[in-house]
Image: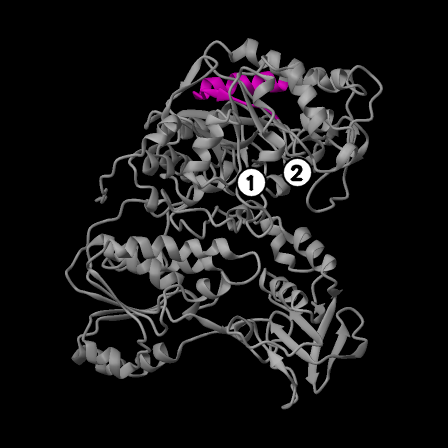
Amino acid sequence: MTQAVEGHARPGRYDILFEPVKIGPVTAKNRFYQVPHCNGMGYRDPTALAHMRGVKAEGGWAVVCTEQAEFHHSSEITPFIEARLWDDRDIPALARTVEKIHEHGSLAGIELAYNGMNGPNLYSREVPMGPAHLPVATFTYDPVQARRMDKEDIRNLRRWHLAGAKRAKRAGFDLIYVYAAHALGFLHHFLSRRFNDRIDEYGGPIENRIRLLREITEDTKAAVGDTCAVPLRISVDELLGEGGLHREEVEDMIGLMAELPDLWDVTLAGWENDSRTSRFAEEGAQEPFISGIRRLTSKPVVGVGRYTSVDRMASLVRKGVLDMIGAARPSIADPFLPRKIEEGRIDEIRECIGCNICVSGDFTSSPIRCTQNPTMAEEWRKGWHPEKVRPRQTTKPVLIVGAGPAGLEAAQVLGKRGYDVTLAEAGTALGGRVRREARLPGLAAWMRVVDYRKGQLDRLPNVGIYFDSRLTADDVLGFGIPRIAIATGAHWRADGVGHLHTKPIPIDAGAAVFTPGDIMDGRLPAGGRVVVFDDDHYYMGGVMAELLAARGCETTYVTPASEVSTWTRATMEQHFIQKRLIEKGVTIRPFTALDAIGRGEVGLSCTFTGRAERLACDAVVLVTARLPEEALALSLKARQAEWADAGIESVSVIGDALAPATIAHATYAGRRYAEELDTPPRDDEAVPFRREIAELLPLDSEGQG
């Protein structure tokens, strides 16, 4: 493996970020702290998870934590896949994570979790428990209620948490959390009057509502505090006013327990407020809520804010707002962020774009992915590394056609491997769809996908970039370059085909019909009444409606789904999108199909009853599906008999040019092409990544497991 590291001097103003920080009985080597974060792997993919955390440690994070680790079978959050520490059999999997973190001199933290009213227990089928008789507070309105805990339940829970802490210590963890944040666990539920209506010593005044938190923190400190730090993670505000936890109240709670934990990890609640997308929150959005915590305690304080500005990080420490810079998403986008700062390679940081595609892994029970870092979760599965690549296997050059996200990623990785690369772009700038979409409302941060890769390409003299190069099959055959990657992207359909309609819908020849591509190219409806038909269901339909409403159009958003941009539930922004459209005066028509487009009107129908209606409008924007820009690929394939004479050995189609999907899919496709070039041919029946299979227990004498 090779790694090109260009030496730079670190600016002295950043030295403060590399001071050690004492956390109870342990010491962090610097101020960079990867807070607990989900990843969609958990108990199912322990070795892949261990390697992912290990790469973070290699990248310089002083503290690397797990996601939440369920410590008792009576509370679990299926279908989400988290870590588990139910009994001693779970210790080896978590110990593997500890080992990978310790290999690089970092501290390993574990977030013990009991979800209580947040866990419907669909796997264990145990009855959920919480401070009150209430429906479980999940993301999916499960028809399950939690029962009110009695004093024996509370004693049992303290005992279970204590057992979990002791197991965590045996697994080798250096920090063992008490988790009371994000409205995702029983301790938060006891703290918040929204959930806690008790009239005993665990309800009512602040002193009572923090009683269980204090008891469990004291239990944990007494059991493991001799060698392990005990951080306390708490949400400073639920953003619900006095109806929920709010800053003034939580500051009082922290004041009452100021010196008890070894570190305070402060957040917002719920999770969707703490991890908002860049479309709805700027870097450091949490600062107004956490800025006063440091004055309440002598213990170190860590907080998050999707920080990528190094100057801002250093300023937070100097001003006494934070002692440690917490990160989840920035550590996913660039696991080597601390090391790059330490080495003065600030301009090489792969900055988080705040799209939350990483979060979607948790909501879809699938391994985490990242738009900026396509190696995320592939460190062990495929052997990929965010900063290291294998050297080239041959001297044969590569032609990449298209400089969108797939083409850019393929070019920069192949260039680092040592290949001579020609990157041909039909337009006059790098970026493809990313450059265009980054000009839409709220998506400016997405341009970082292009900026990072352009910066890498600028350092690679073996990669030549050619603009205004719309190539034909004759051009490609004439170049004589052996390996060709077609990354020509895709375009939005204008015929209504999408999830609902799999055949084109009737469209009058005189109708004013637009696509997102038209809008991004500056061709907009003249004004008046516009219908946006969203059968794509990710962000684009909502963005189109927002843009048109802001331009004064009377906008009606039509979708066969139950809500606006429904897939963005997986990125925790659906409710923010719908709120914004409502505030901008957009009329929202859910459960509605757009079946035909005429002059001055559209034909709609109810997706349940089929009842038809006509709606007057002046223009329609179809946000349905996309088609690959495959003309070049098809033309080359049709002339495959000419390849050998032209010196062409392979033609591969990657990214949206093969099958349109997310930008994260495109960067992954580019990375995969670059990683797998010149590898031995693979049996198409062989699984192309490593996986772990659950252990089979012996059958008992009656043939039952």
Indicate the amino acid at tag 1: Ile
Magenta stretch: residue 679 in it?
Answer: no
Magenta stretch: residue 169 in it?
Answer: yes
Q: Quadrant of residue 172?
A: top left
User: Of callouts 1 and 2, which one flags the residue occurring earlier in the amino acid sequence?
Assistant: 1
- Left/right placement of residue 269 relative to residue 67 reads right
- Give the x, y percent position of residue 546: 65, 63
Residue sitting farthest toward the bottom: 509
Q: Could you tell me what secondary structure mostly forms the magenta stretch?
A: helix
What secondary structure is marked by label 2? loop
Which segment did they paint magenta?
160-179
Q: Which residue is mark 1?
A: 81
Residue sitting farthest toward the left: 395
Q: Please state which of residues 302 and 606 is positioned toward the viewer in this rendering.
A: 302
- Give the x, y percent position of residue 26: 43, 16
What secondary structure is marked by label 1? loop
Indicate the amino acid at tag 2: Gly
Mark 2 crowd level (few <14, some 14–19, many ≥20, 10 Å Cα): some
State whether residue 295 appears in this view: yes
Q: Which residue is mark 2?
A: 270
- Left/right placement of residue 200 relative to residue 160 reads right
State whether residue 78 appears in this view: no
- Give the x, y percent position of residue 626: 52, 72
- Give the x, y percent position of residue 518: 54, 76
Task: Give the quadrant of the C terminus.
Answer: top right
Residue sitting farthest toward the right: 199
Task: Give the quadrant of the N terminus.
Answer: top left
Q: 523 above or below 278? A: below
Residue at 71% over, 30% down? 246
